[in-house]
Image: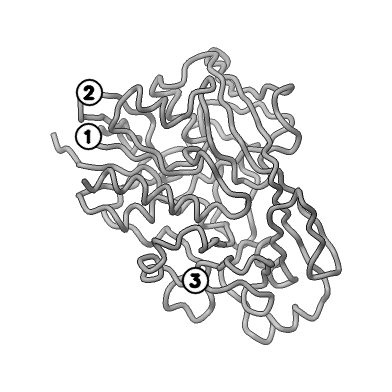
Amino acid sequence: MKISQNIIVGSGFSAFILNKILKKNYLVITTDSKYTKSLPERKNLTTHLKFFSKKFNSYGIYRYILKKSLLHDTLLHGGNTNLWGGICNISKIKKYFNFLRKIIFFKRISFNDTGSYSSNKYLFQMQKIGSNNGNIFNSSKNFKNLIKGHLVSFNIVQKNLICLKVKKKKTKNYFCKNLILAVNTTQLIDILINSNIIKDKDQIFLREHKFKTKISLLPSISKNRNVSLILSYSLPGIVKHAFGTQKNFNKFMFRFLNFFPIFYHQIFYKKKIVARYIVEKKNLHIKEIFDKTDNKFGRSIHYFNMKINNINLGKKLKQTSKNIFGISSPFITNKTPGPISNDLIEKAFEVSKKLNK
């Protein structure tokens, strides 16, 4: 029986950062759609398909019953880095910046260069190093020790030994001393139910900063005291964002599109909103509790601070084993309004200090 020191599950941005700073041996298990297509499709979780982005669907045993909220499942190698705009607040990651700039190119956002702008001078777009086209950073080609498969569940065999049940052509078991979960919210819920961490009738709690969007003919809009951040896109930025292309147009086309005075604004508020769900294992449902969920929850896709029956998710997992760690957005407890990449970086470095001892 082969035992890995560390196994990272997921291949999105947080997993990428950790795989660059882990000093001890590790494996990365990333999902592959060919191992999930036998599961029921969940169309209401596949809401961000874009013309130029890789195609994907959500698959899982549990059906999400949603009314006021919007949840997502980017069941794809590389996760949300296949779709995002790659914006990072570098003021939040100063102590890691010298290391990060060796693996990511940081470009100050502007309408002329990235098609995006904010009055916050610390917002930079993360791009692929050595790219002449301003390619937005995508984590999918930046992993070592990668295994394709789909994590179904895990269980604690004994102290310092965790068994992972991974779906491939045939189900295979992998063993590790430390398990690091770097998967999205909906897939994480599935895994935790299958692993008997989340039980029938348990309630799942999520937070998000209030978020809305606005189209205008002006490059900037006024910011009141309730607003924390406004991120604006000019027409080339809108086109890139809407179609899912991760590189700039040629300079002539970019400048030409910028002549058209139309702007899309993402507005992040200081106020936090909440959503609550109940697990109904008999019906195979994750059901939104409508009277305890705020309208339009999930629109920013940056929901965080998952709790199970009002117990913090990290604490809940530590009750099962001290060798289970989480670095994806559900494990972030105190997010700042706006881009989430800087919070994911902070979380990955925090966990790495424990794993590298």
Among the two numbered marks 2 and 1 on one chain, the one whose residue lies closer to the N terminus: 2
Among the two numbered marks 3 and 2 on one chain, the one whose residue lies closer to the N terminus: 3
Q: Position of residue 21 (x, y in %)?
A: 30, 56
Q: CA distance from mark 2 to mark 1?
A: 9 Å
Element marked by disc 2:
strand
Q: Position of residue 180 (x, y in %)?
A: 34, 40
Q: Residue 153's image quarter?
A: top left
Q: Is residue 213 above or below residue 283?
A: below
Among the two numbered marks 3 and 1 on one chain, the one whose residue lies closer to the N terminus: 3
Q: Are marks 2 and 1 in contact (CB under 8 Å)?
A: yes
Element marked by disc 1:
strand
Q: Position of residue 187 (x, y in %)?
A: 49, 36
287 or 227: nearer the eye?
227
Q: What kind of residue is marked 1? A: Phe
Q: Residue at x 76, y 48 (%)?
A: 226
Q: What kind of residue is marked 3? A: Phe
Q: What kind of residue is marked 2? A: Val
Classed neighbour count for the residue bearing mark 3: other residues with Cα under 10 Å, few (<14), some (14–19), many (≥20): many
Identify the residue under disc 1: 175
Q: Residue at x 59, y 27 (%)?
A: 63
Identify the residue under disc 2: 157
